[in-house]
Amino acid sequence: MSDTNRVWRLRKRPVGEITDDVLSLEQEAIPEPGEGECLFRLNYLSLDPTNRIWMSDMEQYMEPVTINAPMRGVVCGTVIKSNTPEFKAGDIVSGIGSWADYQIGSPATVGLLGEVGDVPVIDAFGTLALVGPTAYFCLLEIGDPQPGETVVVSTAAGAVGCLVGQIAKIKGCHVVGLTGSDEKCQWITGELGFNAAINYKTENVAEALAKTCPNGIDVYFDNVGGKILDECLKQMNLHGRIPTCGLISQYNATEPVPGPYNYDLILMHRLKIQGFIILDYMDRYPEATEALIGWMKEGRLKARLDVSEGLETALQAVKKLYTGENTGKLMVRVKDV
């Protein structure tokens, strides 16, 4: 075990894009666990759009990270020392932690990753810790896709979107994904089984949606908000559902974002729009995990990891989420299990 602990700390609130002075990487002493706590070494750090929210002081579903505090993140690590019966040395845990090599956990913040069979730990964490249950519950509980319906997914090559599209296909739906490059369009149709893909950067989105969704849209899985939400509102069927999982087009905005302009269609088409936060479903994680692992073992659910090597790369890597440079689940590998 190292004698020092590298810790990323929040130094200022970002305004617009995340800049290099928002976080700083510090060398500190390794903390000691208290009663009811454990010390674990970070193996993998999940990078997620919500990181930008946590850095800000906007209204949010958790308290924002305070200035000079360690940056919050979803983590996977190996227990080094334990003062709680729930964990023992060598256990693999995951949950809410920080961007640090060594950190303190408790049963309130982390839990055992669980039995994943032949699935490598990095794949299991990348899929099961956050994005998999998010895709599973947000789509199935709010979107409620039925066989034969049309499901449209934004950021379809992202960590959540690529899983949403595959789950919708498993449920018998016609699935169309929106993403930002021809390469990503090819990946989601050629490898993941989406029926069609739209490059929103080069295509006329309204025309492309009309062509690929000839029967209208029953479920629009929204990760972005903004203009794409407006275009999808125009083509929603009666009693359509819009699970709202993210608003990534707005996270770096420095001024209020206008819209949606087609708000009246929510009334006219009797649409259901509902926000989603995974914290509301924590008690049902085993349900999602069982289904997701089953589909992965059957080869019906595939994931791609976009891995940055080393904790020191986290700040530059997280920026990729807001420029669309990543494909699949973005994460940092600190030390393999």
Image (cartoon, helix red, strand yellow):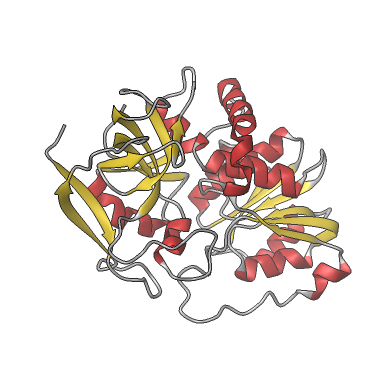
Is 331 left or right of 245, judged from the image as shown? left
Name the residue rendered at 38%, 45% in the picture: 97
> Can residue 124 be seen in the rendering of this structure?
yes
In the rendered image, residue 241, in percent from the top left (x then y), is placed at: 77, 55
Instruction: Return the residue nearer the eye: 80 or 239.
Output: 80
Identify the image quadrant of residue 224. Answer: bottom right
Q: Quadrant of residue 16?
A: bottom left
What residue is at 64 percent from the left and 30 percent from the top? 287
Query: Can residue 193 be seen in the rendering of this structure?
Result: no
From this view, report whether residue 262 is shown above or below residue 60: below
Which residue reaches farthest left?
Answer: 3
Q: Residue furthest top?
A: 117
| Residue drawn at (64%, 40%) of the image | 136
51 on left or right of 277: left
Q: How many marks?
A: 0
Task: Give the x, y percent position of residue 297.
Answer: 56, 21
For the C terminus, which image quadrant?
A: top left
Please identify the residue farthest to the front as the structure is shown: 35
Q: In the image, residue 237 lies at what x, y percent?
A: 84, 58
Identify the residue at horizontal 26%, vertical 50% (top origin). Answer: 313
Q: Can you give x and y, in whole percent of width and height, for residue 43 in the image?
A: 31, 35
248 or 61: nearer the eye? Answer: 61
Quadrant in the picture for residue 283 = top right
